Amino acid sequence: MRRPDEKRLARMRALATHDAGFACFGSSLAGMDEVGRGPLLGSVVVACVIMPREPLLPWVDDSKKLSPARRREMYQAILDCALYVGVGAATAQEIDTLNILAATKLAMQRAAQEAPATLCLVDAVTGLALPFPTKPIIHGDAVSYNIAAASIVAKVTRDRQLQELAKLYPEYGLERNMGYGTAEHISALMRCGPCPEHRRSFIGKWISDAGGEET
């Protein structure tokens, strides 16, 4: 792993300092984040993570700010040192049945149900039914060390799911678009119709245009 420069170390310290502001809740401060609310296909995935106060991992950051290789490195580093890691998901079918926000909350409950947390910082979502208090943080993955760690775990987990789906449904280019509505993905959807992992509530326009036949 490349040695972090002073800018990177300062960034890590800022994230950790934010979470240190909740020290009155004890050492079991959790962070929770989701990945996959916007794609046309696949599950929404949530990670709930409790990181130790020491040692701090200098490359923990909002997953969107890290390269895929760095995310994979940090994913394993987080698993190796975290006090708790829980992952939950809601399927495309659950998203269609519940709506995306309710399905995201369900995935959050699944990720956090066994967490020994005294407080959970959550990236923006409110109204969660969990056995401990939660605090929504706007753009939490960019300001909180624990939420940033959760964002990495959720992102790598979902990316791996999509890479497996790409083998089953190669026509959609999922290994490149991760289920998002790129021109390539929409073109394949129009040409081939949906697969069982598509969110029907997200693709109604293209199903209608393509005739609605399932591959």
Image (tube, rainbow, N blue to C red):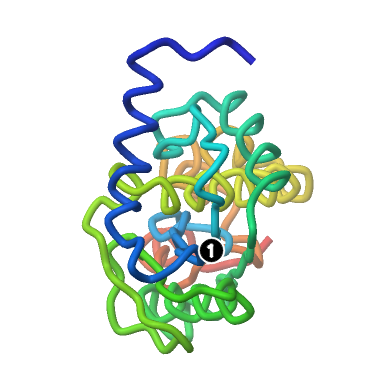
Residue situated in front as seen by the camera: 72 or 76: 76
Residue 15: x percent and y percent? 34, 40
Q: Quadrant of the N terminus?
A: top right
| Side of 158 where 210 appears, left or right | left
Query: How many numbered discs, if any?
Result: 1
Q: Which residue is mark 1?
A: 48
Q: Is residue 100 above or below residue 73?
A: below
| Side of 8 where 90 appears, left or right | right
Quadrant in the picture for residue 115: bottom right
Residue type beneath disc 1: Cys
Q: Mark 1 Cα within 10 Å, few/some/many (few <14, many 20+)?
A: many
Point 28% across, 77% down: residue: 126
Find the residue positioned furthest to the left: 138
Point 28% across, 48% down: residue: 18
Residue situated in front as seen by the camera: 120 or 90: 120
Q: Is residue 74 above or below residue 134?
A: above
Residue 208: x percent and y percent? 41, 67
Residue 191: x percent and y percent? 54, 47
Q: Is residue 120 above or below residue 93?
A: above
Point 41% across, 46% down: residue: 145
Q: Please tell me whether mark 1 sits on a helix, a strand or a loop.
A: strand
Residue situated in front as seen by the camera: 128 or 14: 14
Point 68% across, 60% down: residue: 215
Residue 205: x percent and y percent? 35, 63
